[in-house]
Amino acid sequence: MDVNWGIKEGSSLMLYVERDSKGSIIALHGIPGPGITEVKSGLDRELIDFVSQNVGEDSLKLLLSLTDIETVRILEDLIDLLGRKNIIMFTELPEKAQEKISQRKRIREQMVSQSLMVDDIL
């Protein structure tokens, strides 16, 4: 079974799926290729099943760590939403959490100012 991650650090985990004539996943790729155009999220159940059945534990750990990036962004958005609704105050978070969230927000703002598609990167 072929797993060619080809994913840049910091990018969202989207993999291109190669299927056999029966429709079963036979390989995963980080980039599209001839006949390889179907895209799946790293959180897709079928993709997780394929990885767990066909590749080693290290690949599962990589898959998990890459989905962490997406989860962090969700948590940041959740914190912003809760703050806007006055359910929590940002200053109530631990100081280290405030620092890390603020750093990531500044980086994303810088990226937006450079016309990069932040949601595709983070």
Image (cartoon, rainbow, N blue to C red):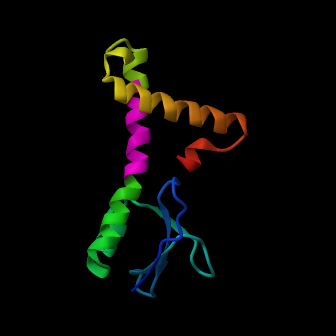
**Residue at left 65%, top 39%?**
111
Q: How many marks?
A: 0
Q: Is residue 60 left or right of residue 119?
A: left
Q: In the figure, 3 relative to 86: above or below?
A: below
- Where on the picture, by quarter, is residue 44? bottom left
The residue at 43%/28% (across/down) is: 99
* x, y percent for residue 98: 40, 25
Q: Is residue 31 above or below residue 68?
A: below
**Which residue shows up at 49% across the image and 79% down it?**
18
Give residue 105's position: percent from left, percent from top.
53, 31
Q: Position of residue 50 (x, y in %)?
A: 33, 75
Q: Main secondary structure of the magenta part?
A: helix
Q: Residue 48's image quarter?
A: bottom left
Q: Write the start and end of the magenta stretch as one range.
A: 68-79
The image quadrant where one finds the N terminus is bottom left
Indicate left or right for 38 with 48 as reference. Answer: right
Q: Nearer the viewer, residue 43 or 80?
A: 80
Residue drawn at (50%, 54%) of the image: 12
Where residue 70 sits: x, y (%)?
Answer: 43, 47
> Looking at the image, is 10 positioned above or below residue 47?
above
Please tell me whether residue 76 belongs to the stretch shown in magenta: yes
Q: Is residue 59 magenta?
A: no
Quadrant in the picture for residue 77: top left
Which residue is the extreme one toward the right? 114
Furthest residue in direction top, as rendered: 86
